[in-house]
Amino acid sequence: MYDELFEVPTVIARYRAGPYAVSREQFLKKAQTDGYSPLTLVRMARALLLVAEIVRDAGGSITPERLRSVLLRKVKSKRSGHLPSPNTIKLIFQAGLPWLRSIGALNVAPERRCRFAPELSAYTEYMRVERGLSAVTIASANETIRWFFASLPTQVRSLRSISIAHVDAFLEGQSHRGWSRKSLYVLGCRLRSFLRYAAHKGWCQSDLPRGVDLPCLYALEDVPRAPSAGQIDRLLEDTAADDPVSIRDGAVLLLLIHYGLRRGEVARLTLSDLDWTTEMIQVTRPKMSRAQSYPMSVPVGEAILHYLRRARPRSRHRSVFLTIQAPIRPLSADSITKMVRARLTKQGVQLDRRGAHCLRHACAGQLLDAGFTLKQIADHLGHRSMDTTRIYTKIDLRGLRQVAEYDVGALL
C-alpha cells in the first residue's frame, strides 16, 4: 500500500517500521476501497503514523481529549512553535479516531445507560417481531420513549411510579418547545402504545394508558401542499447539468415525482430491483410488508441508466444511489430530503414542508388531475388504507369546480 502512495524508499521504510504498521495499512486499503483519492490517502497515512506514535507512547490506548492535547504539543514543536490549524487537527481526528476505534485503542466514556433499558429493549423486540414495524418506525418510537424517560424526576425508579402527571408534564413541555398539534398527537400515541404494553406486562399502573390526553385531530383537516407543475419542471431543469451530483439527483427526483415514492423507498433501491429485461422496478414497501413492481417509464429508465454509466462511483455496495464523495456509501433517506429541500429553496418554492414528501403529494395531484380514481391512486402510492388517499380530494380543483357550478336549485 505504501508503495502506491510514496516514491522515496526511505519514506516507505519509515511508514512500514512505525507502530501498528499492519493495522494502519489495512485501514488505508479500506479507505482506498471506499473511494478516497490518492492525495487524501497520503494525508491519512501521515495522520495515522502520527497518532500511532502517540498511542504507543501512551501505553496502547488513549482518550480523544488526551489525543488532542498531545497533538497540539507534538505538532506545535515540529512547526517552530506555531499552533496547528483547526483543519489540521480535524484531518488528524477524522483519520485517527476511526482507526483507533477499529483496533480497540480509543478510550471513551461509556454511554449513559438509558433508564428502564430492559423494558425498552423488550418493547423494541415486541414492535419488531409481533407488530412487524419498520426499523424507522421503531427508531422513532424508541426516541420518543427515551425523551420521556429523561424527563422523569430522579426519584422515579420504576415504571410503576409513573403517574399521569408525569405524562402531562412531558407533553406540555414539548408543546412549549414549539411542537405542533399534529406532532404532539403522534408523540402521545407513541407514548401511549408503550404504556399499554407496559400495563399488559404489569410494569405500570393499568389505568395509566387511558389517561394519556391527546390533542384533537379532525379527519382530513390538513391540505396536502405540493409544488406546481411549473415548479416541478424548473426543479428538473436544475439537474440538467452533466456533473455527477446533478445526474444522480435528477434520477432521484424523477423517481419521487413519477412514482410518488417515499424517500426511504428510493434510498433502499438496489441494483437487483432494476429489471432491465422486463423494464420493471421493484420497490420494497415496509408499511405494506411487501414489494411492489412498477413499469419503468422511459424518462426514469434513461435517467437511471445515465447515472449508472456516467455518475455512479465504483463500489461494493448494491444500493443504486451512492454518495459521490468518499467515503462512498449508500445515499440515506435524510440526504434525499436535504437535497430536495435545497433544490426547492433554490427555485424559490414557498412551502412549509419542502422535503421529499411534497413531491409525493405532487404525484398524487397529477394523477387526480389526469382522472385516475382514488383506488388507482392508492394502489400507485402504496397506501394501506383508502382513508389516507381521501385527503387528496381536497386538492381536486376540477372536481370541486364542477360541484360549485352545479345547479342545486334545479333539484328543489
Image (spheres, rainbow, N blue to C red):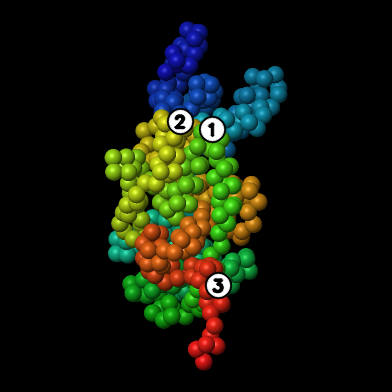
Q: Secondary structure at mark 2?
A: helix
- The image shows residue 216, relative to residue 343, as above or below, that is below
Relative placement, left or right, of 295 versus 350 is left
Q: Nearer the viewer, mark 3 or mark 1?
A: 3
Q: Secondary structure at mark 1?
A: loop
The spot of residue 61 in percent (x, y) is 47, 33
Relative placement, left or right, of 62 versus 138 is right
Cα distance between the residues tagged 3 and 1? 43 Å
N-terminal of the two: label 3 or label 1?
Answer: 1
Cα distance between the residues tagged 3 and 2? 47 Å
N-terminal of the two: label 3 or label 2?
Answer: 2
Is 23 in front, or is 383? Answer: 383
Q: Which residue is mark 3?
A: 401
Q: Are marks 2 and 1 in contact (CB under 8 Å)?
A: yes
Q: Amino acid at mark 2?
A: Arg
Cα distance between the residues tagged 2 and 1? 9 Å
N-terminal of the two: label 2 or label 1?
Answer: 1
Is 402 in front, or is 352? Answer: 402
- The image shows residue 182, relative to residue 412, as above or below, that is above
Q: Secondary structure at mark 3?
A: helix
Q: Amino acid at mark 1?
A: Asp
The spot of residue 79 in percent (x, y) is 67, 20
The spot of residue 33 in percent (x, y) is 41, 28
Q: Which residue is mark 1?
A: 242
Q: Which residue is mark 2?
A: 310
Q: Amino acid at mark 3?
A: Arg
Q: For the view shown, which residue lies furthest in the right direction?
A: 81
How crowded pointer 1 is (Cα within 10 Å; few <14, some 14-19, many 20+) is rated as few
Is 128 in front, or is 89? Answer: 128
